[in-house]
Image (spheres, rainbow, N blue to C red):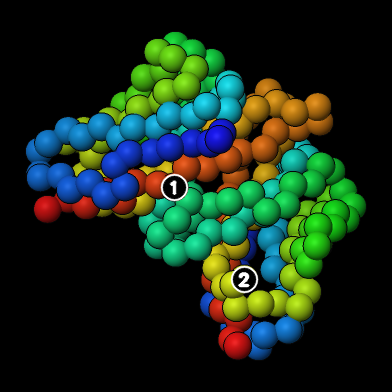
Amino acid sequence: DGGITQSPKYLFRKEGQNVTLSCEQNLNHDAMYWYRQDPGQGLRLIYYSQIVNDFQKGDIAEGYSVSREKKESFPLTVTSAQKNPTAFYLCASSTFLGRGNEQFFGPGTRLTVL
Amino acid sequence: QKEVEQDPGPLSVPEGAIVSLNCTYSNSAFQYFMWYRQYSRKGPELLMYTYSSGNKEDGRFTAQVDKSSKYISLFIRDSQPSDSATYLCAMSASLTGNQFYFGTGTSLTVIP
């Protein structure tokens, strides 16, 4: 059953802690993405990766870090430098079809800072 | 100016109504257009995908792209309470650029 999994579903963080959100896909997609979703603001791109061992900053990368050591995995670390980390985090992946690309999303992780 | 503009709603319609959801965009390079449906506290799911201009139909859903006006639409016929969700439009420019631009989403409620 192909898809994208994210864990945990809910995550609570204390001030000053780093936390890592997991994203795994078995769709054999080359590209993976992390978005942040806040009420009324839509999806904002944090980081994206088109191939293994390579990634680019998105619009709101400050306070976040990623790695792409395997094609299937793209973990996101929310560092203590991120001032307002409470949000819904979405991971996505995409592939190049014959005429374009489609992006598929995981179920999301809701991060709350205590 | 935002790359993609979408009316956030909320939109409330009776069951069976035809729903029209719309997005406008500013970048004429966009060629790939998508509509996502997102239920509360869930990840978005791809609903419709269109390349370039024209219409695409899938069951009760029709996606339209008008590149000359930089305007895309999603029509839902015979709307059902299960269609109640937030609908996000998204678009991208090229095969290799691989960045997607999203609207803020329109919240739809279908009243039984």
Q: Mark 1 lies on which chain?
A: A
Residue located farthest toward the front when viewing the structure as drawn: A1
Q: Residue B99 carries which label?
A: none
User: SS at mark 2?
Assistant: helix
C-alpha gap between disc 1 and disc 2: 18 Å
Q: Residue at x 31, y 47 (%)?
A: A9
Residue located farthest toward the right when viewing the structure as drawn: B54
Q: Examine the rendering and report whether any part of residue A32 can be seen.
A: no
Q: Which residue is disc 2 drawn over?
A: B83
- In this view of the protein, which residue sits in the foreground, B27 or B31? B31
- Pick the quarter of the image with the C terminus of chain B: bottom right
- In this view of the protein, which residue sits in the foreground, B10 or A108? A108
User: SS at mark 1?
Assistant: loop
Instruction: Check disc 2: other Cα within 10 Å, few if <14, some if 14-19, many if 20+.
Output: some
Q: Which residue is drawn at 12% across and 53% down?
A: A114
Q: In this view, does B82 lie to the left or right of A21?
A: right
Q: Residue A107 carries which label?
A: 1
Q: At label 1, which amino acid type do we have?
A: Pro
- In this view of the protein, which residue sits in the foreground, A55 or B3? A55
Q: Looking at the image, is A90 positioned above or below residue A94?
A: below
Residue A100, image quadrant: top right
Task: Name the spot of residue A92 as percent of width and height, x first.
Answer: 51, 37
Task: Name the spot of residue A87 as percent of width and height, x first.
Answer: 31, 52
Task: Name the spot of residue A5 as percent of width and height, x first.
Answer: 43, 37
- In this view of the protein, which residue sits in the foreground, B61 or A48? B61
Q: Which chain carries label 2?
A: B
Instruction: Check disc 1: other Cα within 10 Å, few if <14, some if 14-19, many if 20+.
Output: many
- Pick the quarter of the image with the N terminus of chain B: bottom right
Task: Name the spot of residue A53 as percent of width and height, x first.
Answer: 44, 11
Q: Which residue is drawn at 85% across and 54% down?
A: B56
Q: Residue at x 65, y 88 (%)?
A: B14
Q: At label 2, which amino acid type do we have?
A: Asp
